[in-house]
Amino acid sequence: MLGQNAQLVTQPGFAGQVGTYGSDTAPYVRLIAEDFSILSGADVADIVHFLCVLHGRHPGVIDHAATKTVDDAAREWLIQATDGFAAERSFLTKLTVAAGPISGVSLDDQSNAAVLGQRKALEMLSQSDRSGCAIGAAIALVADWHHIRHILEEIALRVGVEARSSILPSPEKTAGLNSLLAETPALERALNFGAEQLLNQHRGLWQLLEARRNMRLAR
């Protein structure tokens, strides 16, 4: 599910990461893109609940990155990204409430604990003292969220929540910042590391969500 906005991410290295590790490459996301109607109410509740566990808390990845980044080139982007993701967090919370509670898929369901572990990993990543790591994660979050939002907008239609337009920085602007900040090989490696780790956590989440769906179907 490559949205038209996502296709604007044209920087070779950055686009390569998003294209390889981004949510759009996850099998479950591709399945949803082919036919959203396959999702049950429980599947929908899972998606918004666990995304909210991962990213619904403040301060989040972008907020932490803003305190770790002193580069003037990133300031305007960070302000827009911080405000934009605050709106996304509110949207996600509304979806979670409207979709209703999740249900366990087994007697020893550890899904919540697993995603809380992912959130802890992202908190550590976005507070890294390694220059470029935190902002790399924040850049990847914004880039990947443009893909994730397509699913959230479909869910909003299903559960009757208004989906206002995103005010996050555009994929073009986001990719441009990534290129601008990669001034040295060391900074580029740090940016790429932060981005890759963030995207890997998203892929892990989609794998968990698909496994939960499969367990319900197997009952």
Image (cartoon, helix red, strand yellow):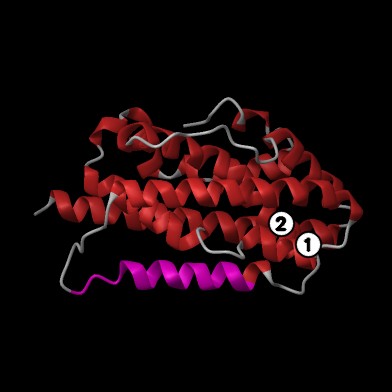
Residues at badges 2 and 1 in contact (C-beta under 8 Å)?
yes
For the residue labelled by badge 2, is the local secondary structure a helix, a strand or a loop? helix
Query: Residue at the location (87% across, 62% down)?
Result: 70
In this orientation, which residue lies closer to the viewer: 10 or 142?
Answer: 142
Reply yes or no: does residue 111 show up in magenta.
Answer: yes
The amino acid type, in three-letter code, at marker 2 is Gly
Which residue in the protein does label 2 denote?
A: 136
In this orientation, which residue lies closer to the viewer: 219 or 48?
Answer: 48
> Horizontally, is 48 left or right of 173 in the view?
left
Q: Is residue 3 above or below residue 114?
A: above
Reply yes or no: does residue 21 show up in magenta.
Answer: no
Q: Give me the disc on residue 204.
A: none
Which residue in the protein does label 1 denote?
A: 132
Badge 2 crowding class, 10 Å Cα cut-off, few under 14, some 14 to 19, many 20 or more, is: many
Residue 13, given in percent of the width and then of the height, sits at 72, 44
Residue 5, given in percent of the width and then of the height, sits at 61, 29
Query: Residue at the location (65% across, 41% down)?
Result: 168
Specify start and end residues of the magenta stretch as a single range: 108-124
Q: Residue furthest left?
A: 219
Q: Kindly report the distance in space between the C-alpha atoms of the residues bearing marks 2 and 1.
A: 6 Å
Query: Residue at the location (36% across, 37% down)?
Result: 155
Residue 215, given in percent of the width and then of the height, sits at 18, 56
> Horizontally, is 6 left or right of 99 in the view?
right
Q: Is residue 72 above or below residue 108?
A: above
Q: Main secondary structure of the magenta part?
A: helix
Query: Which quadrant of the figure contains the C terminus?
Result: bottom left
The amino acid type, in three-letter code, at marker 1 is Gly
For the residue labelled by badge 1, is the local secondary structure a helix, a strand or a loop? loop
In this orientation, which residue lies closer to the viewer: 164 or 19?
Answer: 164
Residue 150, given in percent of the width and then of the height, sits at 47, 34
Query: Residue at the location (31% across, 38% down)?
Result: 159
